[in-house]
Image: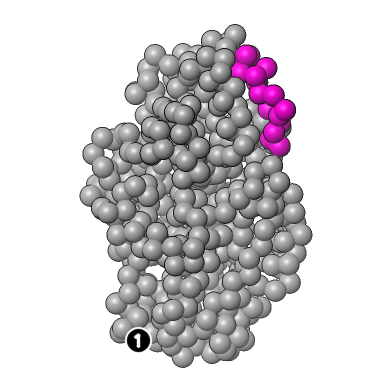
Amino acid sequence: MGRRAIVRVMGVGVAAVLAAAACSSSRGSSSTSTTAASSATTGAGGATTTAAAAKNMFGTLASPCGPGSAKGATDQGVTDTSIHIAYGDDRGFPASPGLDKAMGDAVKGMIKWCNDQGGIQGRQIQGDFLDAAVTQVNAVMQQACANDFMLVGEGWALDEAAEGTRVGCKLAAVPGFTVGPDVANGPMMYQAVPNPVDYLPASIYYQVAQLFPNAIGKTDVLHTTLASATEVSYAKDLEAMAAAGWTNSNCGVKINYNGEPDYKPFAQKFLQCGVTLIYSNVGAGPVLYGMLNADYQLGVKPVYVMETNDYTTQMAQWNTQGIGDGIHARDAFQPLENAAQVPAVQEYLNVVKAVGGDVSQLGQQAASSFLLWATAANSCGSNLSRQCIINYLSKVHTWTGGGLHAPADPADNTPPQCGMVLKLTGTTWSQFYPKTIGQFDCSPKYEFKISQADWGTSVGPDRIATKFLSPDIIKPQS
C-alpha cells in the first residue's frame, strides 16, 4: 500500500483464479479460522438485523450494516444510538496538498452507505475526521484517544510518531495502511490488507524481472529525506529486488521530501550513472512531478516502477504531455478501470461519488478496512467493545473486501500472494500484466520473507512489535 508509504496494496477480479493460500504465521490468534466473505445477520449480543438489510451487498460481501436493537454504552464512543470512530489522512500537508485525500473520502462515503442502511445494528456511525498533515499525527491521535471507539481506515505517513500514544490509550485500529514498523506489527491492529515488517508483497519485482530483463541490470531507487517512511520501505524493497535479480547501481540521488528548487542536478546524476530502471515510492504530487520533468528534460528514459500510491487519477491527469508514459505500478487490488467487470469496484465508486469525494487505490484500501471493521462490529451486537472487535478480527484468516482485492490474512498479519502490473499511457491507466483483464499472477514467493536486519523494530514470538507494549494491552480472547 498506495503508500506502503507508501503502502503495500493488493487486488482481485471476479474472473481471477484466487489460488493463493494464506501463509500461516503466529500472531497470537485462535486456530479457529473465520472466512469473512459475508457478514453475520445475528449479533453476538443478541441484536438482530432484518432480512432486508442482509440483501444489501458490497460486491460479494453481504452488508454488515442495517437496523437492529443493539443498545448500551459498552465502551468509549459507543452509546445506545451511535458509534464514534476516528479516520483520516494527510491531505493538509503543505508540500503535497490533498495527500491521500481519497482515504478520508472513502471512509466518509462508507459511513454514509452504512448509516443509510440503518447503521450497525441500529447504531448510527459518527465519523471524526482527523487531518494529520504528515507532521501533526500525534496531535490528532490524542484527539482520537480522548473521544473515539476505534481508528478505522486511516492512513498517516508518520504514523510511527503516534504509535506510543495509540497503544498507551488502548485505541484499537483497523487502518487503511501502515508505514512505521512498530505500527505495521503493532498490538490491537488488524489491516484488511496487511503490510507487516517481516513480510513483503513482492510480486512487482519478479514480474518486472520477467517483463524487462534488460532493464534490471542497472537500477536505482529515488531516495528522499523522509527516513521514517520512504527509506525504511526501500530497505525492504532492495532486499526483494536483489532476490528477483535486480542490480542496484546506487547513484547517490536523494531529494528533499518537501521538494527541491531545481531537480535537474538529481536527474543529471541518474543520467551519468546510466540507470535503465528507477523505482519510486514517492507519492504522486509536485515533488514526484518535478523529478519526472527533470528526467525528461535531460533525456533520462528509464523504465519507471512505482508503488500503488502513484496509481491515481491525479497522476494520470498530470501526464498530458506523456512524460510519465511507461510508468508501471504494482497492484493487488482490482483497478478502478475494471469497475464494469468487478461489482465491488463499481460499488466503491458509487459510494464515494455519493459524498463528492476523490477515488484512488488508497481509497479502496480504506473502504476494505471499513468493511472489515463493520463486519466485526456487526457480529458484536449489543456487546460492542474493543475487546469483542479484537476477538473477532483475530479469527479472520481470509478477507477480500467483497472482491476488492486478493485474499489476505488480517488475523495473521500476512499479505496476499497475488499481484498485477498497471501501466500509465497518456492520461489512462490500464492493466499491463497479466494480459487478461481481472486476472492476477500468483506465487508463494510473492510473499517475501524479510530478513530481521531490515525490520526496523523488534517483534516477539507472536510477531507483535515490542517497543510500545504494556501489560494491559487488549489481547484476543478465545
Is residue 105 in view from this perspective?
yes
Q: Residue at x 35, y 86 (%)?
A: 50
**Could you tell me residue 474's position as x and y percent?**
63, 67
Instruction: Please state which amino acid type lies under the numbered disc 1.
Output: Thr
Q: Is residue 386 above or below residue 276?
A: below
Q: Residue at x 56, y 25 (%)?
A: 293
Q: Is residue 399 above or below residue 111?
A: above
Instruction: Residue under label 1, please give it.
Output: 50
Quadrant in the picture for residue 166: bottom right
**Could you tell me residue 265's position as x and y percent?**
67, 17
Q: Nearer the viewer, residue 190 or 69?
A: 69
Q: Residue at x 36, y 42 (%)?
A: 418
Quadrant in the picture for residue 342: bottom left
- Per the image, label 1 sits on a secondary structure element best described as loop
**Crowding near pointer 1: few (<14 within 10 Å), some, many (20+)?**
some
Magenta segment range? 251-270
> 298 left or right of 351?
right
Q: How is the image coloured?
A: one colour
Q: Is residue 318 above or below residue 298?
A: below
Q: Is residue 184 magenta?
A: no
Q: Is residue 257 magenta?
A: yes
Is residue 243 in view from this perspective?
no
